[in-house]
Amino acid sequence: MKSYKIAVIPGDGTGPEVVNEGLKVLDAVSKKAGFKYEKVMYDMGGERYKRAGEVLPDSVLEELRKVDAIFLGAVGHPDVKPGILEKGLLLKLRFSLEQYINLRPIKLYPGVWTPLKDKKPEDIDFDVVRENNEGLYVGEGEFKNKGTQDEIALQVSRNTRKGVERCVRYAFEYTKKRDKRKKLTLCGKTNVLTYAWDLWERTFQEVAKDYPDIKTDYAHVDATCMRMIKNPEWFDVIVTDNMFGDIITDLGAMIQGGMGIAAGGNINPKGVSMFEPIGGSAPKYTGKNVINPLAAICAGMMMLDFLGEKKAASIIEKSVMTVTPKMKSMSAGKMGYSTSEVGDFVVKHL
Ligand code: IPM
Ligand code: MN
């Protein structure tokens, strides 16, 4: 029987509650699909930072390099200055473990309310491949004349040929494997950001030659936002840089029913990947048993798919699709069920 070592970082706020439900589902599905897994729990997050002043000790990072995957709840604590945990934990893990893809499925499940009138599950079903290690997220830049009237702040977007190419190649491979409409859209801003998007566009066109069966398309990021609302059915897979990917996947989360259902994977195809619900730590709902655990459950599903447990992943997805029509809403406190009841429901329908 296959066995995996999974590092679990419940993190802050509602992270631990949703991670619990995710693990409940993983436990149950492992028995049905015939695999084993060992959990290694880590307490990184706001509380540990407040207590010990450390965010991600090097020794922990070294341990994380040796696991099969990481399951993360949420980071962000009301008493910790914004940026410390986000940069020191989430981004540090993404960068150090070279998780250069952030894969975010935008899929409307049955019975889930979408703000897009007249759009149905068959219209909202695409994936965003977000570059996850470069762009504006590298933290390069400087102030000039700080604090004066002549102040200038520079924030660099770094795009390397290698970094762009591995991302674009992953997106083509992914579109091929997904095997739906076989269409890959590059989302950029070639009309204004003429260095970065020139490199992206050239790379995209060159890599496309290796994938004659994949249709290619280009949309500026602003037009992408427009289309995601007006014609989401146009999309199959979108590939884009780190910053645009961050923005359009929040928009994507809203049209698929909200943060309560949106999951993502930070992927290093040859290394250690990390799966997370993409919503934050939701301090105001913490400890109330009202947060939606489906995003975490779906992150667990993505993790199993990545590990090669395709059957287990599809069992989870079918169960989620049985549960969503029974829920009143995907929003915290309005589901008609508690966090743990939703988890139990998914387990029951596996
Ligand atoms: C996300 C988040 C992070 C990001 C933050 C918390 C640093 O918004 O995962 O999309 O900007 O990537
Ligand atoms: Mn984001």
Image: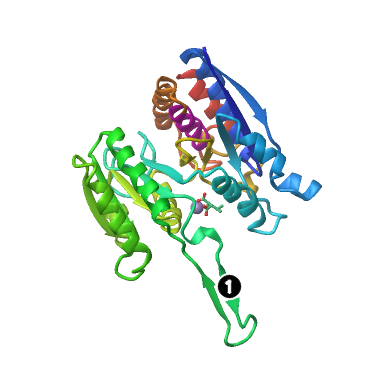
The stretch drawn in magenta includes residue 303: yes
User: Foreground: 26 or 120?
Assistant: 26
The stretch drawn in magenta includes residue 48: no
- Tell me the kind of residue under disc 1: Glu
> Helix or strand or loop: what does disc 1 sit on?
strand
Q: Is 322 placed above or below 221 here? A: above
> For the residue with label 1, is its CB less than 8 Å from the closest atom of ligand 1?
no
Q: Is 89 placed above or below 3 here? A: below
* Highlighted range, magenta: 294-306
Asked if residue 192 lies left or right of residue 9, the reply is: left
Residue at image point 59% right, 76% down: 143
Q: Residue furthest right?
A: 51
**Quadrant of the drawing holding the C terminus:** top left
Q: Residue furthest front?
A: 162
Residue beneath label 1, please?
A: 142
x and y percentages locating residue 72 in the rendered image: 58, 38
Quarter where residue 82 is shown: bottom right
Quarter where residue 36 is shown: top right
